[in-house]
Image: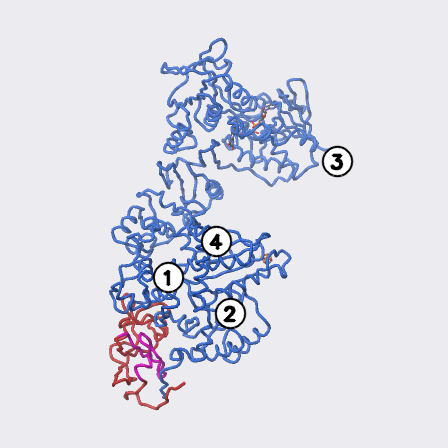
Amino acid sequence: MTAVVEIVTQEQWIEVGSVSDIPKDGARVVKTPLGDIAVFRNMQDEIFALRDQCPHKGGPLSQGIIYGKTVACPLHNWNIALDTGMAVAPDEGCAASFPVRVEGETVFLSLTPNEGCPGK
Amino acid sequence: MKRMKLVMVGNGMAGVRTLEELLKIAPDLYEITVFGAEPYANYNRILLSPVLAGEQTIKDIMLNDVDWYAQNGITLHLNKKITRIDRKNRTVHAEDGTSAAYDRLILATGSNPFMLPVPGNDLQGVISFRDIHDVDAMIEASAKFKHAVVIGGGLLGLEAANGLKLRGMDVTVVHLPQSLMERQLDPTGSQMLQKSLEDKGLKFLMGKQTEQLIGKEGRVAAVRFKDGSEVPADLVVMAVGIRPNTTLAESAGIHCNRGIVVNDTMQTYDPRVYAIGECVSHRGIAYGLVAPLFEMAKVCANHLAEYGIGRYTGSVTSTKLKVTGIELFSAGDYLGGEGTDNLLLSDPKSGLYKKLVLKDNKLVGAVLYGESADGNWYFKLMREGTDVSALRNRLLFGETHLGDAGHGGQSKAAAMQDSDQVCDCNGVCKGAIVKAIVTKGLFTLDDVKAHTKAAASCGSCTGLVEQILSHTLGGEYSAPEAKPLCKCTDYTHDQVRAAIREQKLTSIPQVMSQLEWKRADGCPSCRPALNYYLISTWPREAKDDYQSRFINERAHGNIQKDGTYSVIPRLWGGSVTVDQLRTIADAAEKFKVPEVKLTGGQRIDMLGVKKEDLPEMWGFLAERGLVSGHAYGKALRTVKTCVGSDWCRFGVQDSTQMGIDLEEMTWGSWTPHKFKMAVSGCPRNCAEATIKDFGVVGIDSGWELHVGGNGGVKVRATDLLCRVATREEVLEYAAAFMQIYREEARYLERTAPWVERVGLAYIKARVVDDAEGRAAAYQRFLESQEIYKFDPWAERAKGVDKHEFTPLKVVAG
Ligand SMILES: Cc1cc2nc3c(=O)[nH]c(=O)nc-3n(C[C@H](O)[C@H](O)[C@H](O)COP(=O)(O)OP(=O)(O)OC[C@H]3O[C@@H](n4cnc5c(N)ncnc54)[C@H](O)[C@@H]3O)c2cc1C
Ligand code: SF4
Ligand code: FES
């Protein structure tokens, strides 16, 4: 296991790894004191981060199948938008999304969730 | 103890049955004497019809011969008609002066055929159809004469007419009402029946009232009707009905009212005198069929045996017409009326007609024409008063249709009319469903539910809706109506597959660009399907795309609801060594596995393993010789076995070894859906091989191979594929079946629906009849296995797909 352990405060951007550490149409998990965060990479090499918990019954979204800007939860196949964390209709709910920033090959993550996901 | 004297008058079906029942429960209670007016011992009157038709002989229809009476100590007086009962002195007297004393008396005098009171009814050649004597007379007449007229178009008349026709006579059936068997059939059924009988060469004169039988030199020559018309007749069979034979009882002062009146224990007004059979009137009903008479017999015997617990409370009756080639069944209140619902299935063209009459959610009547196999089942539902509301929508389709996708046979939905209601909850008829399927392009049950509301409420018509779907869409491979693979494309599964094969496409992006996928990255429906089609078609050339696999197949474990995984090592053929058990125990301990459980497939499941621990745990197992059980994949799962001939006293084949051999050949292969096998060592089938995708059952001469079964929500028993002699054949057939399934079934289609879709005949043609094709499929399977038969766990323990199992980063708090 190669992950580096750092101590951070919530507002900081944290370097979590490089784009190529995440498979295309895949996801990796960042373990934080606030719980697991799933960092996704799609076919277009866009990077997204969501709480690794499906709004339905908490399924690990990082284990789902990713297509376009959506991930399908591995437990009961809810579809969650990667950019907003909102469940795709007719399902309702959302998984908190987190800001990500890519500089060159390096991926940075903020642990302060984006606005717009009530209760998460 | 001195035995009581039991005398029976009438040596027919009901009476002798009573004696049989009595002998069973109280063989020593009575000294029995029987009087019969006919010169024959006990025979099966029902089967006089096949005798007349030349299908059976008198010998075939004997039930109890004279020896039987002797063996049971019964005194038998044949050809002796009782003419007087002396109730005061408790004796009966026959015509010829024979008499017998009784403590108990059974009257079982049956009934008399009713002879129309028309002039000439006593001419020679005018007979009834009741006993052997009548049949002999008919057979004799058929050899000498040409024209037969049967008066009466009921059950008896039609069977007589059919028999005479088969014996070469020119037969006309005269019937006063407008439709045949009006007492058992509704008008539609009658018409269909008349049509088939006409096809057999019978002629009908309906609505004709007989006025006179015209004789010539003492023998009948013609029948004249009220309207003045006439038909020639050398033989006239009267089959216009029967009358309970009460003459004797009445003469003895026993109360009769259209039958000898009996209570629920079959006793007449004189409690020493019982009556039974067609001669009785029970609660105002006189029965003319054997089934109720046999129920009476049981009760009567019970009472005679002094048990006194049986009561006869009446019967619902059913009728089957015994005319070879015509299937007709009717039971109960077949007409229906106030407060009843009729379920109808009518297809005159293919000669099918079914009518079920329901009242208060119970089946009260049935008419089946053209196909009467389910008659008994309906009759049972009626007799038992089963609440059929839950079955209602499937009821018409018979027993085999229930709760099961059926056995690859023909869809019966095909026989329904457009106006027949399918979903009762929402009042949707077949026509509406078919229309929605065709015009809106629906392909799934869910689509139909959403658009028509059929099957959307109680769901009891689901099976029927599925049938209508499959019947409407057809099982054709490239039917334009077939379902597109998913919303990303207009092509069907089969078309995509063909393109992959024909254009040699070997990667998902290639397929998507070649077939102009609508969404660049596909979706979670098409990606796993495409990945499967690619690797199964081009095992060497296509690269397995893990990001297009469901997590279970990517992580090589079953994801559980809490996000942990289960680990199930392969136990070949369900056999396990002490070392393997120890390894599993050690692994469970070492990785703190919270629960260990035996699976239904004869393996051991370690539940609740954290994803990060998986590679290390797998490494631990791999070092000790255990490999992945693929319990998580659309792949070969297990080969379940029974102990077989090595240990079992019934075993005729070594099922365990066969299972191990099969598992060693097939493990690691990916299939459209999970694939399970089982091997039993003998037909007792302890390994439940007949609900597996491929089941093998040992028999003396080798093995039986079964295909297309599954347990689960919709249980389906396998179809028998064939029998083979050797182990090598089992392996070859199994691999060939599996390979053809892998190449031709749609992704996520299990063998059961696949076999039903393409038909067992097709599978047999490919796997059994075509030896060359089978060998080639076997070869392709083995080739694919060269690539895919490896342990994914061992690989990952060594570092493959490491990213899958380790966090990107751990951020400390
Ligand atoms: C051709 C034919 C086809 C049939 N097909 C069917 C069918 O498909 N299904 C069905 O359920 N039923 C059928 N039946 C009806 C069935 O055969 C009768 O319901 C049944 O045989 C009646 O039994 P039983 O014992 O009451 O009368 P029987 O079997 O008629 O027996 C009465 C006997 O008593 C004798 N007897 C009468 N009076 C005296 C007396 N005073 N002294 C001595 N002996 C006497 C008679 O000679 C006769 O042998 C058919 C009947 C016929 C004739
Ligand atoms: S299937 Fe036959 S051989 Fe196998 S355990 Fe049962 S009885 Fe024995
Ligand atoms: S937990 Fe994600 S769909 Fe149910």
Which region of the structure is painted magenta? A18-43
Q: Are marks 1 and 2 in contact (CB under 8 Å)?
A: no
Q: Could you say which is closer to the camera, residue B174 or residue B137?
A: B137
Q: Are marks 3 and 2 in contact (CB under 8 Å)?
A: no
- Residue B118 in percent (x, y) is at 45, 15
Q: Chain of mark 4?
A: B
Callout 2 environment at 10 Å: few (<14), some (14 to 19), or many (20+)? many
Is residue B577 depicted above or below B305 in this figure?
below
- Residue B125 in percent (x, y) is at 50, 16
As shown in the figure, which amino acid type bears the numbered disc 2? Arg
Q: Which chain is red?
A: A
Total count of labels: 4
Q: Are marks 4 and 2 in contact (CB under 8 Å)?
A: no
Q: Tell me the distance, in whole angstroms, between the alpha carbons under discs 3 and 1.
A: 79 Å
Question: For mark 3, what is the residue?
Answer: B1
Question: For mark 2, what is the residue?
Answer: B570
Residue A23 magenta? yes
- Residue at mark 4 shares a chain with residue at mark 2: yes
As shown in the figure, which amino acid type bears the numbered disc 3? Met
Disc marking residue B747: 1
Local secondary structure at mark 1:
loop
Beta carbon of the mark 2 residue lies under 8 A of ligand 2:
no
- Screen quadrant of the C terminus of chain B: bottom left
Q: Quadrant of residue B529?
A: bottom left
Question: For mark 4, what is the residue?
Answer: B718
